[in-house]
Image: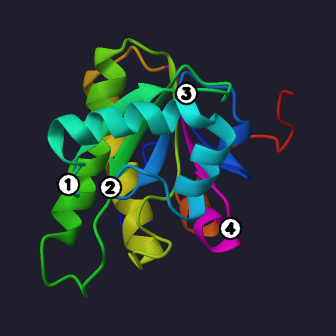
Amino acid sequence: MLNMNFDERIKLFKGDITKLTVDIIVNAANSSLLGGGGVDGAIHKAGGKQILEECMKIRNKQGGCKAGNAVITSAGNLKAKYVIHAVGPVWNGGIGEEINLLERCYARALKLAHQYQVKSIAFPCISTGIYRFPKNIAAEIAYKQVKEFLLQNKNLEMIIFACFDEENFNQYKSFGLTILNNKIES
C-alpha cells in the first residue's frame, strides 16, 4: 500500500466525467482514437464531431496512438478546454508491460497538462473497463503517478479521479481522497 500523505488538490468524484467543469478531461481512449465504448464513447458523444475530426487528423499524421501514450485535442462541446486521449494497456495477467504502460499513460497525460499550463484535470479509471486492468492495481498506479507529479509541479490546482461505477469509486476512496459533492455545475 502507498504511503498515505494526502494532497488537498486530489479529489474523488462519482459520476459522469463529461459533466465536469475542468480545464482538461482525460479520455480512456483506444489506439485508433476514433471513439468506442465506455468513457471513450461518452466523451466523443458529448464533445461532438470536432473531437473526432481532430483525432482523425492526429491518426492520419501518426497512425493512431499506442498504449502508454497520449495526445491532446480541443474539447468540442464539453465544458473543458481540452481532451487528452490516453491509451491504457489491455490487462494480460500482469506478465507483460501492463503496469509500466499504465504508469506511462498517466505520466504522459500529466506532462501534456503541464505543457498546456492548465489548473484542473479529470481522469477516468483508465483501462479498468473492457481492458480488464484490476481496479485496485489501476487505482494505486493512478494515485501514485499523480502524487509524484504534484511533488514536482505546483501549477495544477485540482486533479479529479472521476469514477463512474461503485467498485472503482471504492478503490479510490480507500486512499482517503477528498470526495466532491455529486452536484455538478450546469
Q: Distance of mark 4 from mark 3, alpha carbons?
A: 23 Å
Residue holding disc 4: 165
- The residue located at (26%, 29%) in the rendering is 111
Q: Residues at badges 3 and 2 in contact (C-beta under 8 Å)?
A: no
Quick one: SS at disc 4?
loop
Question: Around disc 1, counting alpha carbons within 10 Å, would you say few (fewer than 14), some (14 to 19), or many (20 or more)?
Answer: some
Q: Amino acid at mark 2?
A: Ser
Residue holding disc 2: 32
Q: Residues at badges 2 and 4 in contact (C-beta under 8 Å)?
A: no
Query: Residue 150 at what x, y percent from top left?
Result: 35, 29
Question: Around disc 4, counting alpha carbons within 10 Å, would you say few (fewer than 14), some (14 to 19), or many (20 or more)?
Answer: few
Instruction: Give the label on residue 75, or none.
Output: 3
Q: Distance of mark 2 from mark 4, alpha carbons?
A: 25 Å
Residue holding disc 1: 66
**In the drawing, does residue 61 fall left or right of residue 57?**
left
**In the drawing, does residue 36 fall left or right of residue 112?**
right
**In the drawing, does residue 39 fall left or right of residue 115?**
right
